[in-house]
Amino acid sequence: MKVMGLRARVSAAFAVGALLLSACVSLVSYESTRNTLLAEREGTAVRATYYDAAVVGAGITGTDPDVLEVLRSLDTGSDRYVLLYLDGRWHSRSADLAAGTAVPTALREMTARGEAGAQRIRRDGRAALIVGVPLSGSAVFYEIISLRELQRTLQTLALVLTAVAIMVAAAGAALGWYVTRHALRPLTAVAGAARGIAGGDLTTRLDPHTEPDLAALSVAFNDMADQLARRVERDRRFAADVSHELRSPLQTLEAAASVIHKRRDELDERGAAAITLLTAEVARFQQLVNDLLELSRRDQPVLRESVDLAELARRVCRSRDLPGDLVEVVPGTPPAWPVDRRRVEQALGNLIDNAVRYGGGPVAVRVGAGFLEVDDAGPGVGVADRAGIFDRFVRGPASHARGDGDGTGLGLAIVAEHAAAHGGNATVGERPGGGARFRIDLPGPRT
């Protein structure tokens, strides 16, 4: 199950909190407004009913009152309906209402006791208010007031409050996203600095004054980076010093072995085999020392110059007795590219040597704008092995095989170092049709 990120969780919490808060406020506001409007509407209806009841009460006095005329004289409009219960009969201005069902029993009983009252009812499926006022004798005046407009107002209010709650929730989510973005900015800076150090930039540091609350973390991070830089520098100097000190005795040993190797025909079979093996191991040891010295010079600046990469690739191939037509130039490639000639020549040579030694030989050397690729005919490199194949002392398809073969295990590490010195990287993938494809990215200088 995928876990939500911290920023998403905080934003969701802000949104939920804002939604709950706005929902509670909206509910309270709605109920308060509804009760207030209903109370005002009922008060207005009761006052109007009492006024109309007074008019009707005065109009029905006498021996033979015209009840219909009296009721029609009332100015009730379209939202009020009047009823009069007189001498055991119901009277209204029209015959469209069944009095027995219009007036609730409880209200009739109340008015029969001489008490005025009001009750909310449903008339034709709509909300209404009925008010009963007892008159002289057994007469009772009822007035039904429609609450349709009030209901519409309340529905509009509910929609508005719902929209406000949704907008507040969205604003809460946006606020949470904004707050976490700024709150996590120092941690983002720490992550970026860590990536920089992991990428080889040991000069990356954090400013403790940028975020006072994380000053202790920034100081600790910078101290760790300083110690790491000093450790790397000590290791580099150690490798350089050891390699430099080994060169002189190795050169003497190589010269002596070369003299003996030239006279191996004078030795017996076992002696000749021993001197041949000794010469090969001395040469391999010499190459290992040279590679270590090359790695120890990683801090030297890149000396860029305009280089014809295609011609450089052909020269590297010919120096290894490979045909120059192995080189393929990608269409659109500029005739020259700003690189450090020595570094690129060594990196490309190491890739070709790696293809010869482990990959069944190179089948293509591709030159493009800011990149070089070497395809081989070997078994390829497994996905699990690709991440570590550019580590030091790793040779062949088996990423962690050590001590076998005739390589030093530093060739691809040097390729990666030279690519990183140019601001690029070295990668390996699968060649279409089988085999491995090694690639060096060489970005141009930053302007």
Image (cartoon, helix red, strand yellow):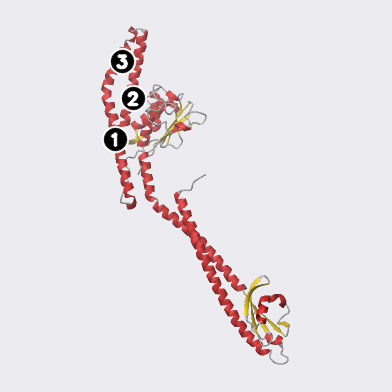
- Residue type, mark 3 in image: Ser
Residue at the spot 28% in from the left edge and 17% down from the top edge: 255
Residue 384: % across, % down: 47, 32
Q: Residues within 10 Å of mark 1 (few under 14, many from 20)?
A: some
Sequence-first disc among 1 and 3: 1
The residue lying at 33 percent from left, 27 percent from top is 291
Looking at the picture, which amino acid does disc 2 mark?
Leu
For mark 3, give the secondary structure.
Answer: helix
| Residue farthest front in this picture | 113
- The CA span between labels 3 and 2 is 18 Å
How many marks can you see? 3
Crowding around mark 3 (Cα neighbors within 10 Å: few <14, some 14 to 19, many 20+) is: some
Q: Is residue 300 visible?
A: no
Name the disc covering residue 258, or none: 3
Above or below for 82 versus 161: below
Q: Nearer the viewer, residue 178 or 83?
A: 83
The residue that label 2 is drawn on is 288
Q: Which residue is mark 1?
A: 233
Disc 3 to disc 2: CB gap under 8 Å = no
Residue at position x 26%, y 22% in the image: 248
Q: Nearer the viewer, residue 143 or 168?
A: 143
Badge 1 marks a residue whose secondary structure is: helix
Return the disc, 2 or 1, that comes first in the chain's sequence.
1
